[in-house]
Image (cartoon, rainbow, N blue to C red):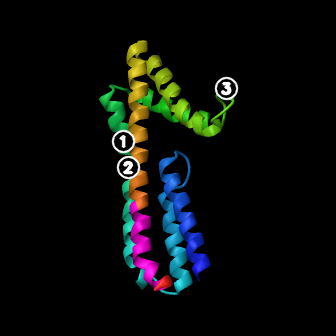
């Protein structure tokens, strides 16, 4: 039983990392681990609080993801073109279609892709490099802040799970 518990904790840690790193599953992995623990325990009553908290965290994470990018874009004066460019840049950067760099790989591409995509998208709209660069930086900063908040929310969900279940396993 303890081995399964530790494996699920490891899965949750991967979920916390995924909440911070774009394009990786985050809070959903934590939710899956809690559901698995419910099946292992043959009772969901013992995990009702972590299950509710993690479900709320998952919904908040989705909202934070959209809201942070949107606020960052609006603060920097970005148009829809910049936001679309950032999304396309994220996909291109993640798939490695940016020039191959000697370090970083897809993770670096996920940072550079949205920046370059937002700048190019915004430039196509306004034909002003200064505005385009400002918009690109705003979108990326908003996304990074959003990912940080998602990571904190995911970590909180894991802590609630551990505090709620530790006694079941070790107590």
Circle 1 SS class: helix
Examine the rendering and report whether any part of residue 61 can be seen.
Answer: yes
Where residue 113 sits, quadrant-wise, is: top right
In depth, the one of 62 and 11 nearer the eye is 11
Q: Please report the residue visible at 51 percent of the width from the left and 32 percent of the height from the top.
A: 114
- Mark before the other along the chain sequence, 1 or 3: 1
Circle 3 SS class: loop
Q: Which residue extends farthest top? A: 128
In depth, the one of 123 and 106 nearer the eye is 106
| Residue underneath mark 3 | 99
Q: Please report contact status of discs 1 and 2: CB closer than 8 Å, yes or no.
A: yes
Q: Residue 115 at what x, y percent from top left?
A: 49, 28
Whole-angstrom CA distance, mark 1 to mark 2, is 9 Å
Q: Is residue 10 left or right of residue 123?
A: right
Q: What crowding class fits label 1: few (fewer than 14 Cα within 10 Å), some (14-19), or many (20 or more)?
A: many
Q: Please report the residue visible at 45 percent of the width from the left and 78 percent of the height from the top.
A: 166
Whole-angstrom CA distance, mark 3 to mark 2, is 30 Å
Check if residue 161 falls in the magenta segment: yes
- In the rendered view of the protein, which quadrant contains the C terminus? bottom left
| Position above or below: 125 against 19 | above
Q: What crowding class fits label 2: few (fewer than 14 Cα within 10 Å), some (14-19), or many (20 or more)?
A: some
| Residue underneath mark 2 | 149
Circle 2 SS class: helix
Which contiguous range is marked in magenta?
A: 156-168
Q: Residue 78 at what x, y percent from top left?
A: 37, 26
| Residue underneath mark 1 | 68
- Mark before the other along the chain sequence, 3 or 2: 3
| Position above or below: 34 against 20 | below
| Position above or below: 19 against 158 | above
Of the residues tagged 1 and 2, which is closer to the observer?
Answer: 2
Check if residue 44 falls in the magenta segment: no
């Amino acid at each position: 039983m303890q081995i399964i518990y530790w494996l699920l904790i490891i899965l949750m840690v991967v979920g916390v990392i995924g909440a911070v790193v774009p394009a990786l599953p985050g809070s959903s992995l934590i939710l899956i681990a809690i559901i698995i623990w419910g099946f292992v325990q043959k009772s969901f009553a013992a995990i009702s609080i972590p299950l509710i908290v993690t479900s709320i965290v998952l919904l908040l994470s989705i909202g934070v993801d959209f809201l942070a990018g949107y606020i960052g874009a609006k603060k920097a004066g970005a148009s829809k073109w910049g936001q679309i460019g950032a999304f396309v840049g994220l996909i291109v950067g993640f798939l490695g279609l940016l020039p191959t760099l000697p370090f970083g790989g897809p993770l670096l591409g996920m940072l550079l892709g949205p920046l370059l995509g937002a700048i190019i998208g915004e430039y196509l709209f306004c034909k002003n490099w200064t505005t385009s660069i400002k918009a690109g930086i705003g979108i990326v900063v908003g996304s990074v802040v959003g990912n940080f908040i998602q990571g904190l929310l995911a970590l909180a969900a894991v802590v609630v799970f551990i505090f709620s279940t530790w006694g079941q396993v070790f107590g």
